[in-house]
Structures are given as structure tokens and as C-alpha cells.
Image: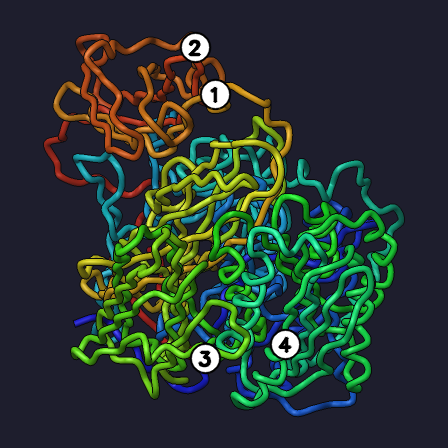
Amino acid sequence: MGFRVNVFLLLAFYLFPGVKSSMVSFSNNGYDGIVIAINPSVPEDEKLIQKIKEMVIEASTYLFHATKRRAYFRSVSILIPMTWKSNPEYLMPKQESYDQADVIVADPYLKYGDEPYTLQYGQCGDKGRYIHFTPNFLLSNNLPTYGPRGRIFVHEWAHLQWGVFDEYNLDRPFYISRKNTIEATRCSTQITGTNVVFKECQGGSCITRPCRRDSQTGLYEAKCTFIPNKAQRARESIMFMQSLDSVTEFCTAKTHNKEAPNLQNKMCDHKSTWDVIMKSQDFQNVSPMTGKNPPPGPTISLLKAKQRVICLVLDKSGSMKTEDRLFRLNQAAELYLIQIVEKGSLVGMVTFDNSAEIQNNLIKITDDNTYQKITAKLPQVADGGTSICSGLRAGFQVITQSNQSTSGSEIILLTDGEDDTISSCFEEVKQSGAIIHTIALGPSAAKELETLSKMTGGHKFFASKDINGLIDSFSRISSGSGNIFQRALQLESKALNVARNNWINGTVPVDSTIGNDTFFVVTWTIQKPEILLQDPKGNKYNTADFKEDQLNIRSARLRIQGIAETGTWTYSLLNKHAQSQLLTMTVTTRARSPTTLPVIATAHMSQNTAHHPSPMIVYAQVSQGFLPVLGINVTAIIENEDGHQVTLELWDNGAGADTIKNDGIYSRYFTHYHGNGRYSLKVRAQARENAARISLRHRQNKALYIPGYVENGKIILNPPRPEVEDDMAEAKVENFTRVTSGGSFIVSGVPPSGNHADVFPPGKITDLEAKFKNDHIQLSWTAPGKVLDKGKADRYVIRISTHFRDIQEDFNNASLVNTSGLIPKEAGSTENFEFKPEPNKIENGTIFYIAIQAINEPGLTSEVSNIAQATKLIPPQESSAPALDTKISTISLTMFGFAMILSIF
């Protein structure tokens, strides 16, 4: 049986930011435009607002000192949900919204913890997506376990804004240093503490013992815990343990621990966090503030989310006659109005050519009759030129004439034409406070459209030859309020050119988290096909059940009454016309009920623009609530202006473009550039054969939970962190499909001809592992490709040394390993290789450092991999060794509130 979670009503509001457009700016040492959004599910609580304010004020001061007087928080907005009562103190938002917020405040999904974290899956130096705090974390006393909340915010801000990573590693808490000592994974190494194993506490006392060394790994046993001293002298590092009073800085090149097996070293080539931060765009040509006084405290504004207001601004110029564009516009706009827009929204419509005409003032969407008042006015004739500014101004007029503010309202602008006067209304657009989503149709659409989206925080889309491109774009423009129950989900988007008397067949799984407000929509280019649809119980629907409207826009839809049956739906379309024609099937639905969270898929590119030969990365996030969905097939379809499509299978394997394995973020490099101009991205996520599962494990990129401290010769333990048992760490998810648009991006600098992929080397290997087996070293890694993560490399170069710096700083002169028998596999495959290092006799405790490069057929070489470590260990006569610098025996336990105080003897 598939995994289904029923939770309280308040959990029905989760929406994950997709293509995020942060409003944060940095000038004169101050950050402005930071948005902290409270989820609509969170019960109203004035204390929560006060705690957020206190955190921001404290964080600003800590940030100022952490950046050596270079930065502070100058202005922050707290976005209050519509579900809270009105207050004279609350202002009207502009482009601020929940799904574009930098920080979200929302309950966790299921029971697994209030740990603050940052959703971060880009490369070193790339910005993260958002910071997540739970209300309970903000309202409770977490001082012993995480430190002051202001410090935690700065730790997470470094993830979010500067793209640095944690300097601890919960999976590898200890490592063997080049001095052959066991060290806690940390930065800096000046952080002191003790290593202990806590046995079960009974009868008011706890038994402890020194950590034992594992004879196979040379490291401490799995239950060994590093307990830091409360009193420290070290000032670094915030990305390791910001909770320590002495820690006020980031690790620098001087204090950075390059040996530690942490994500910062893996992702940033052993650079210190401070080095990465100083290379960020924020700190280019920025000097520390002068004077002795600290900067002023941040200005904190309270904004209250408003009712959704939308105006469609649609191009009906003469060029819309070509390639059935007007028909496609009508099909997509009708689908949007009937199936995507949330009930209760206010919607209006403007059409434009040389001038603009208001078709509908704002109408509140309540039932089918209100939809029809708008769809009846969709443009039927295309003629004239293109005046985008006229359309936008009329859109603003629609909003204000209905006594609504343009601030926070949305405009969906669709055009296929050029307009060299579009920049004339940029200032009006800025002042309006409206959010503008742009859809560029065809290769000639105005090049400045993306500027409108960027300056207002809107989505941007591009549709060209893909007949379903417009429908996919409109389907992605859902509410940014955070109310997931209202959000339409796309299950199918298929288009095929079907020959005479041929069938197109397909299946659509409807999982148990969805099924409300379900529509099946068929479109055609010449004649309505014969339609057969069967639900999981065998009930059948035919052509007569699919209704056409009076617009004659070559589309028909079937709305399933009530809740759609759970299981696999099967459809077939027969082209009865004498000629071949394009047939499409689109399926949309919503969450089954407010108590059930559906699986959500979002997608985006690593950047909005690319200049050849720079590669891009495709990202897709698949999640249920805040939990990642694993083990599914995720495919990206990328289309250029000529209709050329590239299909990529995305991976969540922690190699190549993918930062972290099994985090629900599926990634892949994109290098197949075919010409300059706009490209569109669509992603399909499929769970088949009961292989999907959700992970309940703790997330990466979060503030470190501190188990306790050593203070005045005693160990003071904090309350235990909620842990997930191994057999409960994952739960099955039933079969499902999701389709989502990832927006558009622009490529430039592509040569007119030739194999453009030849300029890319194999990808860097980031997961090289090494271990001794008898006298041999065994290596394993994920194979890169000929071109980054595609194809097969030609050969590998493996080098080895007993000195870490030889590999890191002078790889080409380190000893070469014979790899004559090693033939590279296809990208994404697991590689295994075994060799015997020189000399023949190796002393006990000898550490070898190994790294690898891949070379492709044109002779291009990858970056040097991560550095793996293998230690030669000869098992001692004794099976254990005492922990370093630790003398701990049976101890007495005293309970003080939640803390346990343990004496060290």
C-alpha cells in the first residue's frame, strides 16, 4: 500500500518556492528587501512576530561583527498571512509573497523536529532557496542546544546569501589527521572538547567510557560523541558551532581546516568560508564601515497578504494569426481560468494590439458562470501592431477601477511581437508594485520581457513549437500564498502528431493525496478525435462526455465529479481525420482534502542567462510537505526557439551537478546548446513500480545541534534530539506523475555551427572513497561523462601521496597509479578499482591521500576530484584504545530541568 499521510488542517498550506526571485539588495553595507513570510497554517500569535523581530535585531549586530564591519540588516519585512486578523500596523505588500520569501516560518511536516535549515543545493557560492524556521523553534528556549537565535540566523544567512556550507559532518564526525591523530570534524581545530560514549543512565547515574578505536577504520566507534568545552578561546567558526560564546567569525585561510571531511571542503575545493564570502558579489569593492559606533538597528515592516488579484493582458496583434497562436492562446487562457485560478480570486482581462481594450473589469471567481463571463471575451481576431505598454497601463486601470491596489496584484502578460517602446513604461511598472508574469510566444517576442519579470518578482516563460507550451506556462502560475490546498497540479502534458486512423494511448496515475477538481482536456489542430477514458474501477467516458465550449477553440474537457478515483486512469485518442494532426492531453487536479499534503514538483535552471561555453544546471525538487521524495524518474525537456528539444534524465546521486545524494533535488548539467535565444524548461516526475519513498532523515545545511558542553569539569547534556530509527527513516510513496514548467532562460554566444559540446571536459568526481583491504587500496566513485555528466570519459588519471598538500597543491607531480586496465563506464555508473601502493612494506598507521582526474577523447581534463584518504591499520593485540586526552569513568547524574550534569573524573 502506498504511503499516505493525514495531518491536521493547518498543514494544508505548504508551497515550496519554485523559480525564486529574491528581492534582497545590498548597498552601503546594508541589506534591504529581506522577506520573512509566515505560512497561512500558522495560528495567529503576536509573540511570534515579536520573536522574529528580536532575532533579526540580534542577527544584525552579530552579522556586522562576523563580516568585520562590512554588512548589517537595514530593512526587513515580515509577511503576515491573510488568515490572521487585520491590524492598523500592517501595511500592503508589493511584490512580497510567500513563495518568493527568503525566510519561511512554517510547521514541520510530520513530527521530525524544529531544526532550522536552509534549502541549498547549488554549487559553491550559489545562493540558497530559503531558510525554514518553525514557530515552535522561534517561540521556545533553544539557547542551550543551538545558541542565540540571532547567531543561528547568521549561520543560515551564510548558506542562503553566500553559498557556503557546513563545517561539521554528522555522517563522518571524526577523521584521522595527517599527524595520525583522531580529530573531530570541525573548523577551526582550535575548538576544544572531549570524546565520550554515553551508556544508558539508570538509577540517577550514568556510565561512560572512553571512545574505542575501530580496528578496521582507525576511527572512533559509531557512538562516540564530541562534547565541546563551554569556555573557548577560538573565534571560528560560525559554520561549525555558532552557539559557542567565543565564536564570532568565519574560518579564514589562516584558520581553515582543509583536512576535515565536511561539505564546505568538498563543495568549495578546501577554501575557507571567509574566502568564499569575500568573493561573493555582495562584497566586491566593499570596505568596512568606519567609526566606532555600530550601524542602526534594522527597520522591520509588517505586511499583510491580500486577496489575489489577476489581470490577463493578452496580445491579439496581427502576428498572432501565424502558427495557430491565437487558438493556442485561447486554449491556454481558458484552461487557466477554469482549472488553475483559485476560487475567490479577482480576475480581469485586457487585449491589445496598437492600443489596448479592457474586456473585463475585475470579477470574483466563484462558479462556472463567472469563468464564462471572462472566457467569452477572449480574442477571436488578430490584427494590428504591438504596444505592450498600452496593455500594461490598461491592466493597471482594470485593477484600480475596481478599488484594488496595483501593489501585490498580478499581471499575466502574453505577447509574440516586438516592441521597441517597452522600456518607456519600466518606471511605471516599478512604481505600481505589481507582479508581472511574462509569456513570450515564438522567437520574435520582445527581448525586454524578462526585464519586466525580473524587476517585479514574476515568473517568465517561453513557448514556441511545443503545442502544449502555453498550457504548461499558464498551469505554473498559481497562487504564491502558501496555501497548497488551493494550488492546481498538472499530472499530464502530452502532445503527439498522430497519423490518420492512428491512436495515441496513455496512462495517468491519480494518487491518494489528490483527486479534487480533476480535469481531462483534449485539444486538436483540425478535427476533434474520438476519445476513450477509463477510471481505475472500469468506468468509461467517451467523446460525448468531453464538452466543447462556444468559442470553437479546438478543445474539449471532462470534469470528474467529486473526487477522482485513486489508481491508474487510461486514455486513448483516435485521429479520424484524413490528415495527420497534433493531439494533446492535459490533466490537472488539486489536493484531495485540506488534511492531505500532495507531492509537489518544481523546476528551474541554475541561472537566467548563459553565455557559451558556460554550462547550466537543471534542478527539479520533488517533495511531500518538507520531506524529499526519492527513487523516482525525473526527466527535463528543454526546447529552443526552433523547436529543437533535448531530453535529460535528472539524478539525485550526489555526483556531478547534484550536490547532496537523496535530498529530493534532481540535477543535471545542460550543455546541448542549439542556437542563441530563449529556451523553455519542462519537467516530468514519475514514480513507478512502487519504487518511490519519502525520507524522514534530518536535512543538510542546518545549524548544528549541540548534545552538551563541558563546563567546570562537568558535562552538561542538552535534551536529546528527536531521531529517526533506521527502519522508519523512509516511507513508501504510491505511484504518481507530476508535470511542471521550469520557466525560460536565454543563451548567447553559441557559434553558428560545429559540435558545441567539444569544449566541455568530463565532470569533476566529488564522491571518491578509499579504503585498505589487506595490502591493497580499494577505490569507488561515480563515473563522470565525456561531457561533464554525459557519455563516457576516455581514461582516468589516479595519483597518490602520503602528504595531503602534494595532492591538493601539486597533483601533477604526485605518484601515478597504473590504471591501464581501468576502462571508464557510462556517466552515473559506479566505478571500482583496486591497486597495491608502493612501497611493498607499509608501516602501521600510514595515511595515503588519493585523487583522480578524468580525460575525454578530445583530451580535455576534469578538475581534480575530492581527496580520499586510506589508512593502513594493523589490528592491535588489544581491541580498543582510550579516547585522546580523555579520562572518563563512572559518573554521577544530577537532573536540572531538561539538562543532565555529568562529572568528569
Mark 1 vs 4, N-terminal side: 4
Above or below: residue 820 compared with residue 18: above
Residue sitting at x 77%, y 80%: 91
Which residue is the site of mark 4? 51
Which residue type does callout 4 highlight?
Lys
Which residue type does callout 1 highlight?
Asn
- Nearest to viewer (mark 3 / mark 1): 1
Residue 812 disc label: 2
Mark 2 vs 3, N-terminal side: 3
The CA span between labels 2 and 1 is: 29 Å
Q: Quadrant of residue 386?
A: bottom right
Q: Quadrant of the N terminus?
A: bottom left
Which residue type does callout 3 highlight?
Phe
Residue 755 disc label: 1
Answer few, some or many: residues within 10 Å of disc 4's Cα (few below 14, many 20 plus, some between 14 and 19): some
Which residue is the site of mark 3? 485
Answer few, some or many: residues within 10 Å of disc 1's Cα (few below 14, many 20 plus, some between 14 and 19): few
Q: Is residue 328 found left or right of 386 in the rendered image? A: left
- Nearest to viewer (mark 3 / mark 4): 3
Mark 2 vs 4, N-terminal side: 4
